[in-house]
Amino acid sequence: MLGFLTARRAGLDDPLRLRRAESTRRVLGLQLNPDRDVDRIHGNGINAIDIEAVEGRYMLSGGADGVIVIYDLENFSGKLQYTCKAVCTIGRSSRYVHKFSVETVQWYPYDTGMFVSSSFDKTMKVWDTETLKPAEVFQFEGNVYCHHLSPIARKHSLIAVGTTNPKIQLCDLKSGSRIHILQGHRAEVLSVRWSPRYEHILATASADSKVKVWDVRRASGSLFTLDQHNGDKSKASSEAVNTAHNGRVNGLCFTGDGLYLLTTGTDDRMRLWNSATGENTLVNYGKVCNESRKRLQFTVSRGCSPEFVFVPCGSSVAVYTLHTGELVTMLRGHYNNVDCCEFHPDYQEVYSGGKDCNILAWVPVLRPSGVEEDSDHEVKGAAGQSSVNPAFQDAWSSDED
């Protein structure tokens, strides 16, 4: 690390190089933090969490009890040990609370004054954070499994919604109405995600084992359907057999740059796809346990090299290297199944929620400088020794440095 600082100070290296190296080191040091707790408010399992991107300070959570909670993640106590307090709650006593399980919560990408929630009570509500009252309520014919707002959209304000109906609904925040329907799936839609690279590109996953990628400006159907076998997509007949998984597809996540798409299915597999071509990259992550009948919320790191994937796996969170499929570690701490996790890119932290009603904070625990220097000497003198984690070796410097 001292070498990176010296090179940056001398103008030999791009500052981004140091930032990526330090971010990666922090992710590799993630552990359950005994000094940080999150207020336990939910009386039932936690289905979804979301951290706002404006300040990186407030976190939403939605539970199987229909309750929505907003937490303040900042530590203003000046003490090492502290609890992330719940600043406001839409509890069972509120007249506006969801009647059944909240499946998805999401902040409005540009302003913490608004957030959106969807539930098994067949509604999606757009909330005013200041008053904790719904500014708009969208009614649907079936249970709502998921929704998503584009994190980058400037030319539209659409919310994609997946329900028990195979048709994907596009709701417009400006007009407060459903303006478009995407048809192609044959079973309930379990997950939807907008691309963080192109604002009109949408990916959808369904219980029919298919993942489709759409350009919502087109009226002629999906751009392509992901095929786990990388079959010939030029043949129209192949559309009927293209499947992304051999079971229900219940998880979607784009990488931070939008170049790749990750999917999870009940066939206990996770796959990495080229989002532009739909090609299966054939990265082998091994068995990724997935028994969820609903949406599985997993996440990808941002700003690291290499990037990492955080996936709920039973009562643990599995950490994989994105492009090699290597299992780096298992984050263990929950007493029951984990349903959701979220990466905090500003501090390289991970928050996870599960059926044990707890939200756990996984925080980088950095080694003392003396240990780091000893490890550096070991790497230089005996690079092949197994006592040194190869992930901490200098993979960014060239041989000429």
Image (cartoon, rainbow, N blue to C red):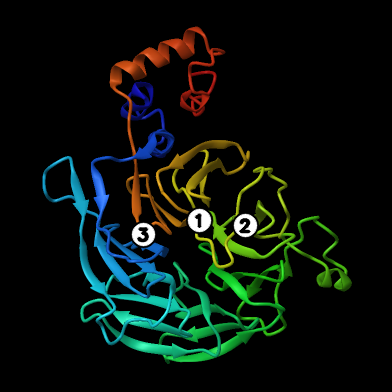
Mark 2 vs mark 3, foreground winner is 3
Disc 1 from disc 3: Cα separation? 18 Å
User: On the rendered structure, is 91 left or right of 218?
Assistant: left
Residue topped by disc 2? 264
Per the rendering, the mark at residue 298 is 1
Q: Quadrant of residue 303?
A: top left
Query: In the image, what residue type sits under mark 2?
Result: Thr
Q: Are marks 2 and 1 in contact (CB under 8 Å)?
A: yes
Q: Quadrant of residue 246?
A: bottom right
Q: Nearer the viewer, residue 36 or 200?
A: 36
Residue topped by disc 3? 357
Disc 2 from disc 3: Cα separation? 23 Å
Badge 1: few (under 14), some or many (20 or more) residues near its Cα, within 10 Å? many
Position of residue 89 measured from the top left corner of the image (x, y, whole percent):
25, 72
Question: Quadrant where the N terminus lies?
Answer: top left
Image: 16 above or below 311: above
Mark 2 vs 3, N-terminal side = 2
The residue at the point 30 percent across, 57 percent down is 56
The residue at the point 27 percent across, 76 percent down is 90
Position of residue 350 measured from the top left corner of the image (x, y, whole percent):
39, 48
Q: Regarding mark 3 in the picture, which secondary structure is present there?
A: loop
Q: Nearer the viewer, residue 58 or 55?
A: 58
